[in-house]
């Protein structure tokens, strides 16, 4: 069957431009937009061997989409250990993040540029049984070539911006060719579902893969012990801080008014990188406050606890009266996951720099489940929030209810993706 004219022209144009792809990638590498050591991947020439057996390929364009893939990757590795997992992305930053976060056994590759040759070489090498694309990352040559080879295709957390939707509406035959080719489409919300359906896609339901993770784990004995030792004094948590944030948090904390005989709330700082713990403790001591490192000393009397230990965020979120989700007070980090404290009934406040979690924060704001504070007014904002404990409890309850509903939708979506994989195996 012949392609719609716009897709045929796209294929012809990308074929003609393919010889110039190495030059373009070289220029991008000089500008820091490509990993020079891995340009061969961008040309569809992988050097990592393909594992034996079935393989699922998941693609997220940049950091936000890559983060949303992780629960599905982890579930695949846990429930289908016989299935290899390939994760592709398109940016250097997302590749660095995935290098740290992917579970053992999962493979990362840069997505090849969307030329017919690059798509062919990529698919020749990896031979996926199922391909899962996140949000709106649609590359015609890769999609059409995969479909022609019998690869099952899923589009999840699917959405279309106003500009993208208008562009596809102007090319209805091309849109139908691509969107009708998916075996499973799960829209991010009702508006996205309507748009995708109007373009020819069959939408099976709604699911946003940013949701669906289990609550952070906790050592029950440590939790019970700390609840007794820390007493009733309010606890303010700064979770996953980065350089430049600790000083801002400490200044805001010092400006808080005393609450009863205990003085100002106790502060717990959890640095994103635990090796920074001693330097943070030195900063606290220089301010004249008492402090301790959780990795070395008892932590029940200090004014500021530096929790320089791994895997204990679930503990502190359960203990905190208010948690600042850090990575959001300075530019260049993009914020951290607000869904983790929301699942644990912990009130949330965030700085303004949350580029990696924009939609999650927007959803929480709509659900009245989060507060915001710029670094310049952090102290007064924290004081205002801590002075209204009942309002904080309502905020936390609203956030938890919202996230619980979306988590259930996402887990059902993951079930559908796994069912598609099982259907492919039976075919």
Image: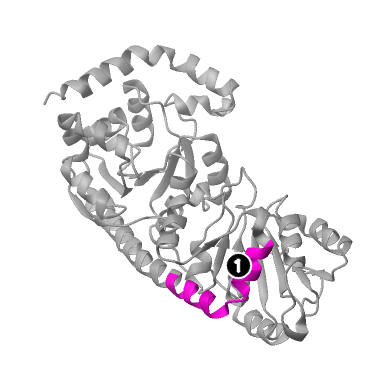
Asked whether residue 241 is in view, the answer is no
Percent x, y for residue 62? 47, 40
Residue depicted at 30% across the width and 59% down the height: 413
Magenta highlight range: 379-398
Query: Callout 1: 10 Å neighbours few (<14), some, many (20+)?
Result: many
Where does the N terminus fall, quadrant-wise? top left
Determine the image quadrant of residue 60: top left
Front in this rendered view, residue 218 or 322: 322
Residue depicted at 20% across the width and 34% down the height: 169
Q: Is residue 292 left or right of residue 352?
A: right
Percent x, y for residue 390? 53, 80
Percent x, y for residue 188? 32, 53
Q: Main secondary structure of the magenta part?
A: helix
Residue 202 among those drawn in magenta: no
Q: Which residue is mark 1?
A: 323
Label 1: state its secondary structure: strand
Q: Is residue 72 left or right of residue 237?
A: left
Percent x, y for residue 170? 20, 29
Relative to 424, say whether 258 is above or below.
below
């Amino acid at each position: 069957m012949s392609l719609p004219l716009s897709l045929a022209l796209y294929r012809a144009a990308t074929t003609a431009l393919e010889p110039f792809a190495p030059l373009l990638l070289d220029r991008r590498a000089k500008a820091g937009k490509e990993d020079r050591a891995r340009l061969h991947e961008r040309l569809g020439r992988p050097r990592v061997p393909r594992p034996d057996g079935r393989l699922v390929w998941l693609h997220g364009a940049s950091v936000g989409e890559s983060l949303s893939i992780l629960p599905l990757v982890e579930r695949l590795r846990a429930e289908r250990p016989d299935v290899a997992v390939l994760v592709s992305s398109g940016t250097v930053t997302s590749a660095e993040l995935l290098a740290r976060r992917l579970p053992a056994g999962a493979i990362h590759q840069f997505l090849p540029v969307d030329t017919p040759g690059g798509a062919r070489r990529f698919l020749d090498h990896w031979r996926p049984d199922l391909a899962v694309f996140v949000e709106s990352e649609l590359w015609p040559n890769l999609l059409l070539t995969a479909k022609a080879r019998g690869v099952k295709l899923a589009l999840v957390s699917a959405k279309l911006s106003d500009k993208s939707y208008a562009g596809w509406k102007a090319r209805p035959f091309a849109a139908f060719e691509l969107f009708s080719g998916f075996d499973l489409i799960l829209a991010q919300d009702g508006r996205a579902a309507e748009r995708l359906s109007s373009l020819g896609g069959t939408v099976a339901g709604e699911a946003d893969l940013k949701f669906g993770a289990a609550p952070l784990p906790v050592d029950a004995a440590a939790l019970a012990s700390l609840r007794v030792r820390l007493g009733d004094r309010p606890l303010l948590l700064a979770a996953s801080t980065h350089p430049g944030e600790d000083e801002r948090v400490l200044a805001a904390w010092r400006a808080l008014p005393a609450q009863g005989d205990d003085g100002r709330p106790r502060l717990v700082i959890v640095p994103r990188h635990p090796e920074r713990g001693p330097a943070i403790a030195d900063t606290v001591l220089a301010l004249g406050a008492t402090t301790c490192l959780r990795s070395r000393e008892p932590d029940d009397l200090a004014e500021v606890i530096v929790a320089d230990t791994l895997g204990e965020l679930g503990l502190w979120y359960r203990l905190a009266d208010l948690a600042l989700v850090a990575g959001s007070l300075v530019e260049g980090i993009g914020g951290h996951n607000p869904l983790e404290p929301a699942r644990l009934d912990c009130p949330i406040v965030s700085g303004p720099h949350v580029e990696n979690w924009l939609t999650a924060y927007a959803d929480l704001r709509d659900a009245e489940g989060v507060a915001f504070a710029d670094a310049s007014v952090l102290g007064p904002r924290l004081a205002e929030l801590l002075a209204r404990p009942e309002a904080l409890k309502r905020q936390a309850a609203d956030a938890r209810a919202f996230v619980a509903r979306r988590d259930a939708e996402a887990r059902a979506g993951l079930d559908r993706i796994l069912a598609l994989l099982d259907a492919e195996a039976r075919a």
